[in-house]
Image: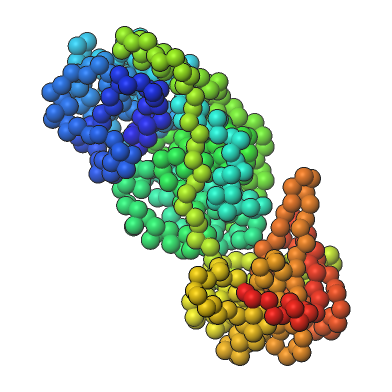
Amino acid sequence: MALYRLLDALPIFAGDERITRLFTLVPGSDFGADTLSAIDAHGGRTVPWSEACGSTYDLVMAASPKGDLRLLHGPHVLLPHGAGFNKSIPGEGSADSASGLDPTYLRRAHDDGPIALHALAHPDQVTRLAATNPRAARHAKVIGDLTLDRVLASLSLRDGYRAALGTGARELLILVSTWGPESLIRQHPGLPARLAALLPYDEYQLALVIHPNERSLLGTYDLTERLAPALDAGMVLPDPHEEWASALIAADALVTDHGSAALYYCAAGDRPVASVHRGGGELIPGSPMGVLLDRIPQLGRAEDITDALEAYRPGPGHAAAEAAFTLDGEAAERLRTEVYTLLGLTPRPHDVTPRLLPPPAPAPRVPTAFDVHVVTAADGLRITRHPAGTGLPGHHLAVEYGTAPEQLTRSAGLLYRRSLPRSAAPVDLAWTADGWTRHALSAYPGCRSAGALLRSGACLLRVRGHEQSYVVQAEPRPEGGLTAQLDPAIALSAAHARLISPQPAPDGRTALNCLIGERTFRIALRPATDTEATQVI
């Protein structure tokens, strides 16, 4: 949405009481309602189009050349709508012209809404503009990309973004979809749910960055209902204004169509990227995205996702970013200088620095029941969890009590409960670990084991038919200055698998190796003491 490009540019006027910012909506857009809602959400003042056309302004800023912008009186500044000018839109403007550089929309009479500045992100874009519209190119200057500058300025916030997303030590895989009939979400609508079912939950986190136009066409409610299977399995759907860029910084790998959002990911770091684009009439050959898609692995089936990402070799991502952007982080300062010259004003003396991107706000839906697959290997128990119902049944169904539907709760092989927050009641009543595990096995006769997660980080586990209860605790795993910590619920699944196996139950302290992806966690298992059994949960 062009509005978000404008919002990234308007901080060049920050701190200047001489500037009044007004918004108007050019008629004819299919996305007008959402645009007005977004302006209102940001507290912007809007002017009706009819009123805007009857006034004269010191400056008119737009991030798309489409529509009757010529009716707005004042010098026009045109900002890029995306990155790289990679697409043409069939049925719009000139055939085979890149959207944003189309001479049909840039051709204006001298006194009819003249473009005083066409801000571009790369010298090659000026060359491309000059080849199709020499007159328009006279007012073109390489400014840079203000959204990219925010991305580059925010790279050090990666750990915070991952924490906000709940990524942890998992690999964050992002799907990127542009809008229109050739987009990922139109061509491969089942891909998010399929990947959410295929990828082990404890090794991968999935996110979908979808173009705001597509969100607007569908509506947030309908979109989330369509994506419900993937969202219920933990997929993240970042906000289309700023959170999408935060998520790209946090990502470890990316799957893209021909949309330009992938170029920001490539500029943030040369990490694995694969394509699901199958051709069509929209991609401009030789554009930065065209070059990128020619050089990266293709993803055919969802089942081949790890092979496709592993086939990526460093180089194409960085080269594509260099072809799309001027990577120096000075776009805001350049744009401010140009715009204040047009206004005939001297900028305020403070520096203009890119505003850092906020952490992604929407917390993903966390699955509360898992099909747990257990494989006994020479070096330990390999545990692989998938959200319940997304694939084949596993060794056991592990269900978090109090958060999952009763039908799943009654089907659990392992039922576990996390500690509740302290109550504010004047007289509180709370389960002990031993009391609740005994109650769970009594109330749910199909359950083989019940576990209580203690506030200490350890767990108390009671197995049907065993006289004693056990304490289960996963040891932190040092990783070169970092520490990986295992969710106690996973440790419970490993202990459950061990204790219901034909092996004799341990009568003293024993150790298990729990394998999660490429990591091995050591789990201590021993009989519980009376003190541990009576801890409040």
Residue 342 falls in which quadrant of the image? top left
Q: Residue at x 61, y 87 (%)?
A: 439
296 to the left or right of 137: right
- Residue 494 x %, y %: 73, 71
Badge count? 0
Q: Residue at x 52, y 41 (%)?
A: 246
Q: Quadrant of the C terminus?
A: bottom right
Q: Nearer the viewer, residue 216 or 350?
A: 350
Q: Residue at x 55, y 57 (%)?
A: 195
Q: Nearer the viewer, residue 502 or 447?
A: 447
248 to the left or right of 39: right
**Residue at far front of view:** 426
437 to the left or right of 57: right
Q: Is residue 528 above or below residue 62?
A: below
Q: Nearer the viewer, residue 221 or 363?
A: 363
Q: Residue at x 25, y 44 (%)?
A: 33
Q: Is residue 495 visible?
A: yes
329 to the left or right of 506: left
- Residue 273 x %, y %: 59, 41
Q: How is the image coloured?
A: rainbow
- Residue 531 x %, y %: 75, 78
Q: Is residue 161 above or below residue 77?
A: below
Q: Quadrant of the N terminus?
A: top left
Q: Is residue 300 visible?
A: no
- Residue 341 x %, y %: 35, 10
Q: Is residue 91 above or below residue 398?
A: above
Q: Nearer the viewer, residue 167 or 260?
A: 167
